[in-house]
Amino acid sequence: MKFRMNSVTVAASEIGRICSGQRRWVSIALSLGFWGTILGIKAFVQNEFERLNEEIILPNKQLFPKPPTFDDFFWAFGILRSRAFPRPSFAMIPFADLINHSDEVNTEDHGHEVRASWLFSRDYLYQMRSPLAVRAGDQVFIQYGLNKSNADMALDYGFIDFSREDHKFYDDKLDIGESNGLGETVHFDIKYGQPLPPAMLQYLRLLALGGTDTFLLESLFRISVWGFLELPISQPNEEHICQVIRNACKSALSSYQTSIEEVTRSLSFPRMEIAVGIRRGEKRVLQQIDDMFRKREMELDLLEYYQERRLKSLGLVGKQGEIIFWESK
């Protein structure tokens, strides 16, 4: 018996075969829509449902003896939005979807598909991993979304994370910032064609410290932590920074109604030159920042992080990156 449903499972069904080329969640929702209790109705996916009704459902009535309504389809969409695991493959996994959220977890990379260990098995298992120290009997947590706001949390999962508003490491981070001439609110001047201000990445890494990286906030490291922040701390920390900055750039750029090319053509009107020149400069800087962090995202696997640097400084890593274990003689 299979206890999970993903796009591969649906593709093997009669409904899946006629949904080739559709978005992954669409084919799963179409299959899932017949199961469970209908919970509600929203207009958010109305257009998608109408297109599917015309292209998939009506031409294949033999597969849908009782055609799904929009209410059915939107319920399935809501279940997928709140319960499906996007990584490593978009899938519904009963019991695993009961695991609660904690903002202490600083990575969304908690799920892995592994091949079953028993002989001749071709099945894959879903393995959960936690970056937190977990003892026998402890509750296991995962991260529902590093970039989700409390509004997103309320919409998708029905709760808000108060720790996001009142962070327990706030005082430590503020103390480190103020000790290095930076306060709760900091302004950095970013100029087109020039690199980011030197302290900007350090400050962003400090703000993004979470999960297992928070040991650097201990008083033992208070004097040296700012120097550590000059270089990448961990992949989740660096990835979080890239995602937050890129989302902010995209949000700011979306507020402009015209492209840079369209704005440039408008310079033919003399009285608009000043305003258009400022807008063009703003958009170019935003696109430059987005491009910088996009390239940074692509290099995350190649960067050297704090743990590797620390092991090397102690002589515990070889030339090929292997860990050296010291044995007593």
Image (cartoon, rainbow, N blue to C red):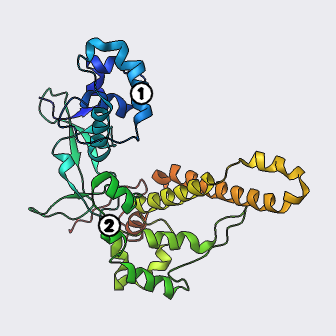
Image quadrant occupied by the N terminus: top left
> Is any part of residue 297 visible from this angle?
yes
Q: Amino acid at mark 1?
A: Glu
Which label sits on residue 211?
A: 2
- The number of numbered badges drawn on the structure is 2
Frontmost residue, 235 versus 207: 207
Image quadrant occupied by the C terminus: bottom left
Residue at screen point 79% across, 61% down: 275
Q: CA distance from mark 1 to mark 2?
A: 43 Å
Q: Nearer the viewer, mark 1 or mark 2?
A: 1
Answer with mark 1 or mark 2, whichever residue precedes in sequence: 1
Q: Position of residue 30 (x, y in %)?
A: 30, 28
- Mark 1 secondary-structure assignment: helix
Q: Position of residue 184 (x, y in %)?
A: 50, 81
Q: Residues within 10 Å of mark 1 (few under 14, many from 20)?
A: some
Q: Is residue 55 left or right of residue 84?
A: right
Q: Residue furthest left?
A: 137
Q: Quadrant of residue 255?
A: bottom right
Frontmost residue, 112 versus 15: 15
Q: Is residue 86 left or right of residue 295?
A: left
Which label sits on residue 50?
A: 1
Q: Is residue 159 above or below residue 74?
A: below
Q: Is residue 112 left or right of residue 272?
A: left
Residue at screen point 33% across, 28% down: 27
> Is any part of residue 22 visible from this angle?
no
Q: Is residue 68 left or right of residue 273?
A: left
Q: Residues within 10 Å of mark 2 (few under 14, many from 20)?
A: some
- Mark 2 secondary-structure assignment: helix
Q: Position of residue 89 (x, y in %)?
A: 33, 37
Residue at screen point 34% across, 81% down: 218
Q: Is residue 94 above or below residue 150?
A: above
Q: Quadrant of residue 310?
A: bottom left
